[in-house]
Amino acid sequence: MRAPKGIALWVGAASASVLLVIGIGAVLQYMAAGSENRPHLIEVVSDGLPAVFFGTAILMVAAGMGASWLFRRHPHAARQLAEQSRSLLAAEKGFRVSTAGAPPLAELASVINQLADAYHRIEHDLETRSAETRARVEEERDRFVALMSELSQGVVVCNADGRILLYNPRAAALLAPSRPDRHGDYTPLGLGRSVLALLDRNQVAHALDMLQHQVGHVDRPQARFVASAANGALLRVQVAPFLGAGRKLAGMVFTLDDVGQLMGRESQRLRLLQSLATGVRGPVANLRAATENLVSFPDMPADRREQFVEIAASEARVLTERLNTALLAYADALKGSLTLEDMRAADLLAVAQRRIAEALQLPVAIEEADPELWLRVDSYAIAHAMTFLAARLASDYELHGFRLRAGSGGNLGEVDLIWTGAIVGSDALSLWEGEPMRVGHEETPLTLRDVLERHGSEAWLQVDKIRQISRFRLLLPRGQAVAPMPYRGTAAESRPEYYDFDLFERIDMTGALAERKLSELSYTVFDTETTGLEPSAGDEIISIGAVRIVNGRVLKQEIFEQLVNPCRPISRESTAVHGIDARQLANEPTIDQVLPRLHRFCEDTVLVAHNAAFDMRFLELKEAATGVRFGQPVLDTLLLSAVVHPSVDNHHLDMIAERVGVRVIGRHTALGDALLTGEVFMRLVPLLAERGIVTLGQALEASRATYHSRLQY
Amino acid sequence: MSGLRKVLIVDDEPNILMALEFLFKRSGYDVRLARDGGEALKEVDAWRPDVMLLDIMMPVKNGYEVCQTVRERPELAAMKIVMLSAKGGEAEISKGLSLGADRYVTKPFSTQELLATIDQVLQPGAAGRQ
């Protein structure tokens, strides 16, 4: 055991004090003895000298041991207590200070241990509570995301700057590229992107402007407009603001509805009217002129009379034909009004069943519901009409239950309200058809006839007198099956990244880029596959993959993937790497069609690639031909890896991935490599921060300084 | 009683009544007219026509009701009903045929085709509807 620091001084001092006391005692004795006794004294001492030395030595050792004992119990124990107390904060939870030492120190130590206990208890409580809060927030977010996914309307939420914070799958589907087989088609919808790019820029800007003005003056500010999306869909857009602290505009919620079909029907109706007006005018004019001549001039010669009669007959034929043609061509436009919605007949029956049963407290069964049948209906009005009829039947004829049925009858759907027993005359139905429909306290000014007319529909009673079964039959227009929402998920383990509320806190994108923190920037990580390794010798890009990183997350939903027809053969070595041969690319777009889309995909982001100089060289060589210039800053994971691990020579993507702990999957497709590069880049950012490289400017400067940046292609 | 086939024409529009009366008389039918649903049912009882040309939108009783009333009476089963209407939607046609009409002709129509249709439904064994 090593002697504690400072103990030697204490022991030495104690022993020396004993020696000093004995020495001083001896000198005083010698002085006091007087000159006559001194020789005798010296003699006595000389005789007992060994005993004197021995006694002194024992006393010195005893004093040293005492000093050591005292030292260990007081100053040393105090110092140890201070050290242990200091490490209490950082050490394992079970660690406590030693209670050795003098009683007051031991007491102090045990008080410190009590404090440590209390501290750890509080720490534990706080951890538990914050874990609970985190779990609750996660759960709420998950529930929220699930809810958003279920909405049949598209929803896009943006912050006050117009940057997108959230969108649901329906919005993604509504704004998806028109050719869904091509992943690579540019979708303007993406976290952190500008909402202005989604629809017509001017319309969106106008709506935002109006909202800015309305906030504070109007109770529920709102803007609506109909706009066409890039994919040609016609959308009804509703914008509502939401306010943050100080009732200032914090962001906006956009809801999107596809109204293409409705508008289509409306414009069809308009065309029907126009075609009838123009098609009928001419023949009617001719008919009228001919017959008025016949009336006005009864004395006209017989041959002339015959001519006019023939004109009247032929114009009447033309009129008939025009009318029939127009009605046939626009048959769909006549099917119901704008308020009708396509809905499954089975769902309509379920609604009616519930409403009738609740209103009348009678059993209602579903006899048959064709699962394939869709109707175009105002479901509220139809359910209300059926409930009204059931109520009249039940009260006037004392019926005790109903059955419902839905089946298809040619181009129409049949919905039947069926009962057994009482035979109802058709005159009763005629009477009811004209009454305002009242059920309990629920009354509409609409009559059954109104509802039928709005649906272009008919209804009647069918009676089987032998079996005593009556049915009230409604003929309703058939609707189109509404396709289930497309699922745009990716890998099973990854939760869809449709939202990012941290974007609320985002600083302005226009801030001096070089000063911006790497962890805050948005990136487009991309990779290309090529026909060969020499762009200047005519090698071409055959595939581009890219993925966005926003707010420190690789957004696997927001990808760009496109094969490119290089219009030249591909070397065998290259095919061996990526497995793509020229035949596969014959029908793909050429680079001049693809680069503008990639450019829009990269808007407002910093580019990231592995060995970026290679890919950028290909892009630069196309600048003149395509007019597309990628002017944004570029970070190279190869160079950044060299900055982080300067002593390592191998900076292949696989090797870096292994070093920073990213699992390698799906390599050697452009998108697979881009995704891997993105993950690697995200791991490199904190490693760069450890070396004091925090901003984009610093990262670019450090990259430039590394040896590898001198490589030229 | 003559051997002519009997046609009852039911419509509330005098112009079409006049034209059809002329047409069917000239084509060798025995013709009577009715101006609404009530009158039509009286004629059916009193005269027992072979075929009834029946408009839908009429006062008192509409064409659907007349048709339904007639079809509820088994003794009138042999009588043919041809609906003649400006209502040309699929739902209306379907309703007319469901209520027991043998044919449904939409206005406007060709007189020659109408004659052919009547001729057809009056053929012995022409029970099927169209």
Image (cartoon, coloured by chain):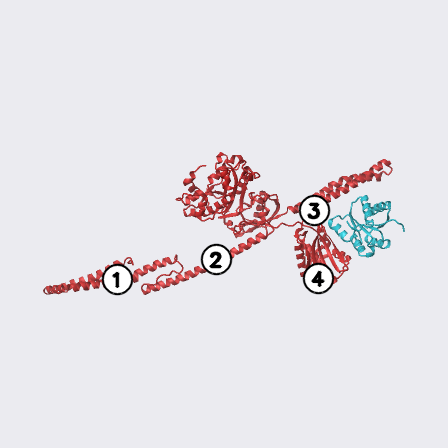
Question: Which quadrant: the N terminus of chain A?
Answer: bottom left
Of residue B18 and residue A470, the one placed in the foreground of this image is: A470
Q: Residue at x 68, y 46 (%)?
A: A265
Regarding mark 2 in the picture, which secondary structure is present there?
helix
> Residue B66 lies in what quarter of the image?
bottom right
**Is there a contact, CB below 8 Å, between mark 2 and mark 4?**
no
- A491 vs A276, left or right, is left
Please name the residue that numbered disc 4 is placed on.
A401
Q: Are marks 4 and 1 in contact (CB under 8 Å)?
A: no
- Name the chain under label 4: A
Q: Which is in the foreground here, disc 2 or disc 4? A: 4
User: How much space separates mark 1 and mark 2, taking CA atoms?
Assistant: 54 Å
Of the residues shown, which amino acid type is indicated by label 3? Answer: Asp
The image position of residue A84, as x and y in percent, is 35, 59
Estimate the spatial distance between the alpha carbons at disc 2 and disc 4, rounded to whole Å: 55 Å
The colour one sees for chain B in the rendered image is cyan
